[in-house]
């Protein structure tokens, strides 16, 4: 053996072993009750629904199920396939037992704990937050808005010992049908947090209608989950958006004090 090459070979082997040790196995996330694959995480990269769906093992796999209230009973995921007829590019999963259509949740397969911290729900009638909603909506061009908060959640997203606030607010004059938007309608989700000693509010997803729009199909936006989907200890924010013919899920990651969208699925007519 040529000893001149031994250190290089050993170095290559050590690097390969270290790289393999750093790699985490595939994690996947599904939306319940509709069984859509939201996406996945592998080797430090986010995978969209199609990429994650193609990598599903096809064998029976237990998914831990989470709502905002905590962990629920597990479900078993089986074979995945593309929803080619309705939503091409989005994968669906066979799930047992059959999901309860009234129970919205997120299923996760991951080697780490997806819910290291649970959000606490606060009263949605607090005047300080109703004023924040009015100010935010007015800033979007809606005069004399009606403030309606649907969710007020406190949780330490980044595990720094200080809670952030997630606020969902929606108002629709014709909420029963929502076939079009009327003037004054809105729905959004905002993050309120302390940044360098100052409180900042970020509206990171939503829609606002200062005027009626017959062509709009308005969505209701609400927080669907607060889960660690990449194993770094920081919670991602999952937002469910629904309209009269469909909806979707988006995943938002905290990056430098801002929530940034990293995954999204949308399905509807």
Image (cartoon, rainbow, N blue to C red):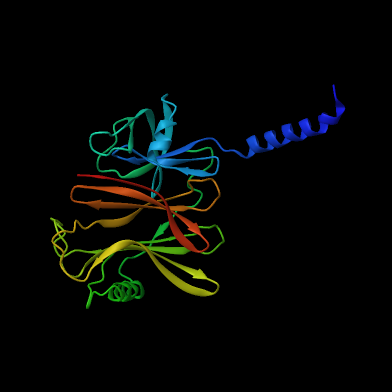
Which quadrant of the structure image shows residue 31? top left
Which residue shows up at 38% across the image and 30% down it?
77
Q: 101 and 142: which one is in front?
A: 142
Q: 111 and 83: which one is in front?
A: 83
* Residue 54 place in picture, x, y as percent: 41, 31
Q: 91 and 128: which one is in front?
A: 91
Say whether residue 151 is visible.
no
Which quadrant of the structure image shows residue 30? top left
In this rendering, position of residue 234 left or right of residue 137: right
Looking at the image, residue 176 lies above or below residue 193 = above
Looking at the image, residue 21 lies above or below residue 174 = above
Q: Residue furthest right?
A: 3
* Residue 15 place in picture, x, y as percent: 71, 37
* Residue 51 place in picture, x, y as percent: 42, 37
Which residue shows up at 45% across the image and 59% down it?
259
Quarter of the image for the N terminus: give it. Answer: top right
Number of marks present in the image shown: 0
Which residue shows up at 43% across the image and 29% down it?
61
Which residue shows up at 56% across the image and 62% down it?
161
Say whether residue 14 is visible.
yes
Q: 90 and 199: which one is in front?
A: 90
In this rendering, position of residue 243 left or right of residue 237: left
* Residue 170 place in picture, x, y as percent: 26, 63
In this rendering, position of residue 205 left or right of residue 193: left
Quarter of the image for the C terminus: give it. Answer: top left
Q: Residue furthest top?
A: 1
């Amino acid at each position: 053996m040529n000893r001149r090459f031994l250190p290089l070979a050993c170095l290559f082997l050590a690097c390969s072993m270290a790289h393999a040790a750093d790699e985490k196995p595939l994690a996947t996330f599904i939306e319940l009750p509709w069984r859509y694959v939201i996406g996945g995480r592998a080797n430090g990269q986010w995978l969209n629904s199609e990429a994650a769906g193609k990598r599903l093992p096809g064998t029976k796999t237990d998914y831990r199920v989470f709502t905002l209230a905590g962990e629920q009973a597990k479900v078993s995921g089986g074979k995945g396939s593309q929803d080619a007829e309705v939503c091409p590019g989005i994968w669906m999963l066979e799930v047992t037992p059959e999901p309860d259509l009234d129970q919205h949740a997120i299923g996760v397969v991951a080697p780490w704990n997806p819910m290291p911290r649970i959000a606490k729900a606060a009263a949605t009638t607090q005047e300080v937050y109703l004023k924040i909603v009015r100010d935010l909506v007015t800033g979007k061009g809606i005069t004399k808005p009606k403030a309606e908060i649907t969710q007020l959640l406190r949780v330490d997203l980044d595990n720094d010992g200080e809670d952030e606030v997630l606020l969902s607010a929606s108002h629709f004059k014709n909420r029963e049908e929502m076939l079009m938007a009327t003037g004054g309608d809105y729905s959004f989700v905002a993050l309120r947090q302390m940044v360098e000693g100052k409180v900042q509010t970020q509206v990171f997803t939503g829609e606002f209608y200062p005027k009626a729009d017959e062509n709009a199909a308005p969505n209701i936006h609400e927080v669907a989950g607060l889960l660690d989907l990449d194993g770094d200890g920081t919670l991602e924010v999952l937002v469910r958006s629904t309209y009269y013919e469909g909806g979707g899920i988006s995943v938002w990651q905290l990056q430098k004090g801002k929530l940034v969208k990293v995954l999204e699925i949308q399905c509807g007519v």
